[in-house]
Image: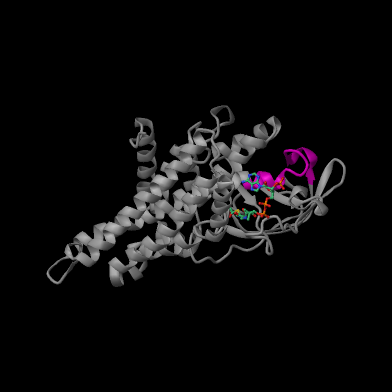
Amino acid sequence: MDFVLSEEHQMIRKAAKDFAEQELLPGVIDRDEHQYFPEELIRKMADLGFMGMMVRTEYGGAGLDTLSYVLAMEEISKVDASAAVCMSVNNSLVCWGIQEYGTEEQKQRYLNPLAKGACLGAFLLSEPEAGSDASAQHTTAQDCGDYYLLNGVKNWITNAGIAKVFLVMAQTHPERGSHGINTFIVESDWPGVILGPKENKMGIRGSDTRSVTFQDVKVPKENRIGEDGFGFKFAMRTLEGGRIGIAAQALGIAAGAYERALHYATQRKAFGVPIAQHQAIQFKLADMATRIEAARRLVWKAAWEKDQNRPFGLYSSMAKLYASEVAMWATIEAVQIHGGYGYVKEYHVERMMRDAKITQIYEGTSEIQRLIISRHILQQHG
Ligand code: CAA
């Protein structure tokens, strides 16, 4: 067992850290306040290879492993969790899904530009009445011979306003339940694709989240991913990987808040000494450091299992569950350590606290992760 990162992994981590501190930190408060993320920053992330990290080089990606991806995700999330979710959805939900299950033609046409960051992707599973219960899809894809007719509404879609490529789940054979669902590649500018207004969110406010309505959208048959009825399994398998990315995002939010709290505690004086010399603060810092390290080990374990081509669904859910709970708890502690300063935007930790909450909700709530974990362990138990 080796807990030391290779030189290559250390370089990737440093590249992400430098980028986050130099390019993302300036302006992160303004982007949170006014809810935007400039195209120029996406361009810069793409130039560094962050938009298609695990995509093979022949399809325009960086050809790296999952561990590299989580290292970069952690560093970027320490500074700007909105940038991180935009990157995460493109990498693990959209690019990975097409690379793994797409046809050669789909890969040439869509994966190549997505991996290079020439365009962005979004993953459209959730609906007004299908969140945790993902197979209860109301969006329909009627088989019309050489095309499908898509109708329905998708909710809370990350990247919706800036993505060109949508992966859309829809029900084709309602009588077959989850076996009747298909996934389609839909271009966001096709007739009948209607974007809702940008959601005014509590956290990750720099990221673009909207609902998307489909009104008689004609989707060519060759844009279906996999066999007829494969759509739900596609979504579940893709989300297993996606949850490693969100776990890394949660880890980064927690670690970013901890680093700020540690720094503040050594600078701020109360009762004649830096507050870091008070045991009340020392115990908080000790607990934060310990839980963050435990979360990091779970995230790396999930990434390692995936890189070994072993089943990783149990570990991705464990990593997401634990890291997101650590993120929520650690950011609250970071605000507490900052006292009144923690409650104002200039000190960053209040934003991190707001950002942390979504990691317990999207790509499966904490309750769904517990459900998945318990299914795995009971199945192993026999
Ligand atoms: N891999 C492959 N197949 C899987 C699978 C997996 N991980 N999980 C389930 N399946 C298969 C099952 O084997 C079953 O197939 P068979 O009938 O052939 O046996 C079929 O799918 C149905 O499975 P279940 O009966 O287990 O399905 P369920 O209705 O009980 O739901 C669930 C399972 C785990 C709760 C699922 O609905 C789920 O994951 N819900 C959460 C959804 C979610 O994470 N949404 C996130 C939205 S995307 C997002 O947030 C992105 C973003 O913008 C940031």
Q: Is residue 34 left or right of residue 170?
A: left
Relative to 327, is 314 above or below?
above
Residue at screen point 59% across, 62% down? 198
Q: Is residue 13 left or right of residue 59?
A: left
Name the one closer to the observer, 301 or 127: 301
Residue at screen point 50% across, 40% down? 46
Residue that sits furthest to the left in the current view: 272
Residue 382 in picture, x, y percent from top left: 59, 46
Q: Locate the N terminus and report the quarter of the image it occupies.
A: top left
Q: Which quadrant holds residue 138?
A: bottom right
Residue 131 in picture, x, y percent from top left: 64, 60
Residue 190 in picture, x, y percent from top left: 73, 49
Q: Residue 23 in magenta?
A: no
Read off the magenta span. Answer: 219-236
Label total for image: 0
Q: How is the image coloured?
A: one colour
Q: Is residue 75 visible?
A: no
Name the one closer to the observer, 77 or 212: 77
Name the one closer to the observer, 26 or 15: 15
Q: Is residue 275 left or right of residue 135?
A: left
Q: Is residue 3 visible?
A: yes
Residue that sits furthest to the front in the current view: 382
Q: Which quadrant holds residue 347?
A: bottom left
